[in-house]
Every structure is written in C-alpha cells, then in structure tokens.
Image (spheres, rainbow, N blue to C red):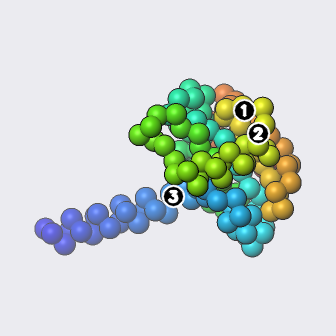
Amino acid sequence: MKRVLFTVLFTFIGFSSLFAQDWQTDFTTAKEIAKKEKKPIVLVFQGSDWCGPCIKLDREVWSTEEFKKYSKDHFVMLKADFPKRSKNALSKEQQDHNNALAEKYNNNGYFPFVVVLNSKGEVKGSTGYKKMGPEQFEKLLSSYN
C-alpha cells in the first residue's frame, strides 16, 4: 500500500513540475535565458495582492495549464510584483530591482502591464488586461515578436 501511495505521489509531483510556470524575477537572468533560447521576454507588472485585473489575468491566463505549457516553449516569463500587504512584502533588493524595471518600462504605473521584450531588453509590444482566454493571449503576445 505504501508503495502505491509513493508512486501516485511522485507521479503527481512530476506532472505538477512539468507544467510549472518558471517565473524569473531577475532581468539580467531573463535576458541571458532569452538570448540562449532565442525567446522573447514577457515582463509582467502586477500587484498580486491588491490589483483586481492583475489577479484576474493571473487566474484567466498565467495560471492556466494551457498557457504554462505554451509559455515554457515560447517565452521567458519575468515578473515584477508590487504587493501592498506587509505579509507579501518583497526583499528590499527585489523591490529595488522591480522599481528600476518600472522606471524603465512602466513609468506610467499601469497595472497589470505586460511588456514583450527581445533579449536586449528592447520593447516589441505591450498590453494590459484583456478579457480573453489563454490561447488568444498567447497569439497576442506572439504577434509582438
């Protein structure tokens, strides 16, 4: 019985990690990966604990298995989060990093704001929240490439 439980558990963990979203939080690392893998960077500015449209975008697109699978092969996902609740506070270093990204790519302070960049950090396109499913969002982001 224990052997069956372990087998089921490890199978589930294996499948979960197969479709896990690999969010980067460091711009330099994201650019290195993008250059190596020849993929665009999708930079997402969000307020994960206060921004209603950000939460909807996460639920309707980023967290779907369809988008996770697609993005793994087509994008380098980079998150710049700006939580407000103290329990979700980022390290000072990460907050400074996100502030620098916002200063360069989101100086109007829009949330959510999605910027598609090439491996050099050049803007190819941008969008905000749109009421569309993962497939349509994939097509939109890919059109900026």
- Residue at the (80%, 62%) spot, across then down: 119
Which residue is denoted by mark 3 in the rendering?
A: 19
Residue 74, horizontal then vertical, whole percent: 71, 59
**Is 44 left or right of 82, judged from the image as shown?**
right
- Number of callouts: 3
- Residue at the (35%, 66%) spot, across then down: 11
- Mark 3 and 2 residues: CB-CB less than 8 Å, in contact? no
Which one is closest to the eye, mark 1 or mark 3?
1
Looking at the image, is mark 3 or mark 2 earlier in the sequence? 3
Q: CA distance from mark 1 to mark 2?
A: 5 Å
- Residue at the (72%, 48%) spot, across then down: 101
- Quick one: quadrant of the N terminus? bottom left
Determine if residue 94 is in view: yes
> Which of these two is toward me, 63 or 135?
63
> Which of these two is toward me, 102 or 13?
102
Residue 13, horizontal then vertical, whole percent: 37, 63
- Around disc 3, counting alpha carbons within 10 Å, would you say few (fewer than 14), some (14 to 19), or many (20 or more)? some
Give the amino acid at mark 2.
Asn
Give the amino acid at mark 1.
Gly
Mark linked to residue 109: 1
**Is 112 left or right of 3, judged from the image as shown?**
right
- Around disc 1, counting alpha carbons within 10 Å, would you say few (fewer than 14), some (14 to 19), or many (20 or more)? few
Looking at the image, is mark 1 or mark 3 earlier in the sequence? 3
Which residue is denoted by mark 2 in the rendering?
A: 106
Q: Quadrant of residue 129?
A: top right
- In the picture shown, does residue 32 fall above or below 145? below
Q: Quadrant of residue 55?
A: top right
**Is 68 left or right of 86, judged from the image as shown?**
right
- Around disc 2, counting alpha carbons within 10 Å, would you say few (fewer than 14), some (14 to 19), or many (20 or more)? some
Q: Secondary structure at mark 3?
A: loop
Determine if residue 143 is in view: no
